[in-house]
Amino acid sequence: MTLVKEAPARPAKKRSAAPAAGRRGRRRENIAGYLFMSPWIAGFLVLTAGPMIASLYYAFTRYNLFTPPEWVGLDNFTTMFQDPRWQKSVEVTLKYVVVATPLKLLLALGVALLLAQKRRGQGLYRAAFYMPSLIGASVSVGFVWRALFSDDAIVDRTQKVFGLDVGGWIGNPDYVIYALVALSIWQFGAPMVIFLAGLKQVPQELYEAAEMDGAGPLRRFWNITLPMISPVLFFNVLLESIHAFQVFGSAYVVSNTQCGPADATLVYTCYLYQKGFKEAQMGFASAMAWTLVVAVALVTAVLFWSQKKWVHYEEAAK
């Protein structure tokens, strides 16, 4: 009989303390990160998320800031949809968005194409064109704009030279909205900078090859520039459309806080401000605010859906 000799048991290896130490280090880093983020998190909860939740509740109540809110269900929304001034505010806002956004982007793209070319003093030109975007939203610029487009002001006198006698735009219900459009177009600096960054990423070899094939400037722009910067164009369209729906300061100041004349500059947010803070109908104003949120979300969804047909990404091409 053969005896099988048992192998001696190997001593158990001691577990390394490195993984545990690594986990403790990562935990400390996470805690430090959350501590640094805590001011932003607190601000978001107190100043953004909290008011949003409260306004959603107030949208279904009758609330005037002085008495406790009273639950009314969908009454605010029903009254809002039947309100002629609310319908007017939607009409004015849509007109502003449809006119101001394309014109602003066209001017921004045109200036970006000019600034993309190498020339002396390029930095100075970029700063000069971007400057209106920094100061355009200020109240002082709104007062200046109202003075420019008032009766017998520089715009009125200039148009008379060309035989156009329509008076000041500010007091004319048919033209005052175009004064707001002009102010929006004047602030084209931000989308211009984004367009300029996109144009810098277009490979010059594509232009050289197209030029050798006999393609002219317009054909190169249509077949090379636009497809290559289509992601940047989509971003600008999305951003400027959302900003246009939220216009308030310029309409409020240029119309001397009246959003007129004849409600000609009664943009959506201006009417929301009147109902909420002038008439103390905070429940109605909250319903208006959430309707605007839903409308902007739908417009954003449509834009994202449409990008599949006209936005070209390099990853998709590969």
Image (cartoon, rainbow, N blue to C red):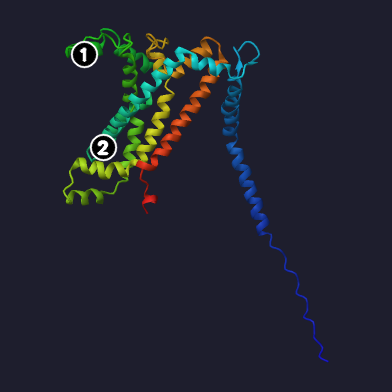
What number is the disc on residue 113? 2
Give whichever of discs 1 and 2 has the lower sequence position: 2
What number is the disc on residue 159? 1
Residue at image coords 56%, 33%: 40
Give whichever of 296, 200 is nearer the camera: 296
Image location of residue 47, percent across then percent down: 57, 26
Image location of residue 124, percent across then percent down: 28, 33
- Decide: is 238 above or below 6: above
Q: Tag 2's secondary structure? A: helix
Residue furthest right as drawn: 1
Q: How packed is label 2: few (under 14 Cα within 10 Å), some, or many (20 or more)?
A: some
Residue at image coords 32%, 8%: 171
Q: CA distance from mark 1 to mark 2?
A: 30 Å
Q: Quadrant of residue 164?
A: top left
The image quadrant where one finds the N terminus is bottom right
Residue at image coords 26%, 33%: 110
- Decide: is 211 above or below 172: below
Give whichever of 190, 14 is nearer the camera: 190
Mark 1–mark 2 CB contact (< 8 Å): no
Q: Quadrant of residue 118?
A: top left
Q: Tag 1's secondary structure? A: helix
Is residue 91 shown to the viewer in this render?
Answer: yes
The image quadrant where one finds the C terminus is bottom left
| Amino acid identity at mark 2 | Leu
Image location of residue 82, percent across then percent down: 49, 14
Judge from the rendering whether residue 317 lies leftward or rightward of residue 294; answer left or right.
Answer: left
- Decide: is 64 above or below 5: above
Judge from the rendering whether residue 221 lies leftward or rightward of residue 173; answer left or right.
Answer: left
| Amino acid identity at mark 1 | Gln
